[in-house]
Image (tube, grey):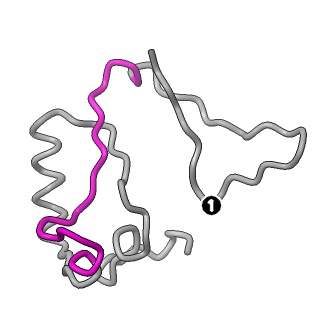
Amino acid sequence: MLFVALCGRDIDLQPGSAPKLRPLPADFGSRSAVSYSPFRTAKNVADRDNEVITAAMIKQDLDLLLAGRFTLIRLFDSSDKVARPPWLEVEDVPP
């Protein structure tokens, strides 16, 4: 059984309308997925707010996920601290 939930700020549902869904790849149902968050030491919200996330930490995490053959990743936290860290140099990521 597969459940897909919609989330994100680019979804604009008007009464009586349906969301525009992108097609899923043919291998979607056979890939391994994980919900990911880069926080390592935080045990509460205050700890999380003060934790520093580095590019090296993210790279190490993604290398581990790739080694484990996880090819679908859902960000557990989509706050700006996680989704748009100051060291990220991608100009065309929408705010």
Q: Is residue 52 above or below residue 14?
A: below
Picture mark count = 1
Residue 17 image position (x, y, % from top left): 85, 39
Residue at image point 47% right, 26% down: 25
User: Which image quarter is the N terminus in?
Assistant: top left
Residue at image point 10% right, 47% down: 64
Would you name the residue on which mark 1 appears? 9
Q: In this view, does 68 lie to the left or right of 25?
A: left
Q: Does the magenta stretch include residue 85?
A: no
Instruction: Name the image quarter holding residue 40.
Output: bottom left
Q: Is residue 47 magenta?
A: yes
Residue 8 image position (x, y, % from top left): 58, 55
Residue most toward the top? 1
Q: In this view, does 69 lie above or below 85?
A: above
User: Which image quarter is the C terminus in?
Assistant: bottom right
Residue 5 image position (x, y, % from top left): 55, 38
Residue 42 image position (x, y, % from top left): 17, 70
Q: In this view, does 69 lie to the left or right of 26?
A: left
Residue most toward the right? 16
Residue at image point 25% right, 75% down: 48
Q: Which contiguous range is marked in magenta? A: 28-48
SS under mark 1: loop
Q: In this view, does 13 lie above or below 42?
A: above
Q: Is residue 76 left or right of residue 57?
A: right
Q: Which amino acid does label 1 sit on?
A: Arg
Between residues 28 and 48, which one lies in front from this camera angle? 48
Q: Is residue 95 above or below residue 9?
A: below
Instruction: Name the image quarter holding residue 35.
Output: top left
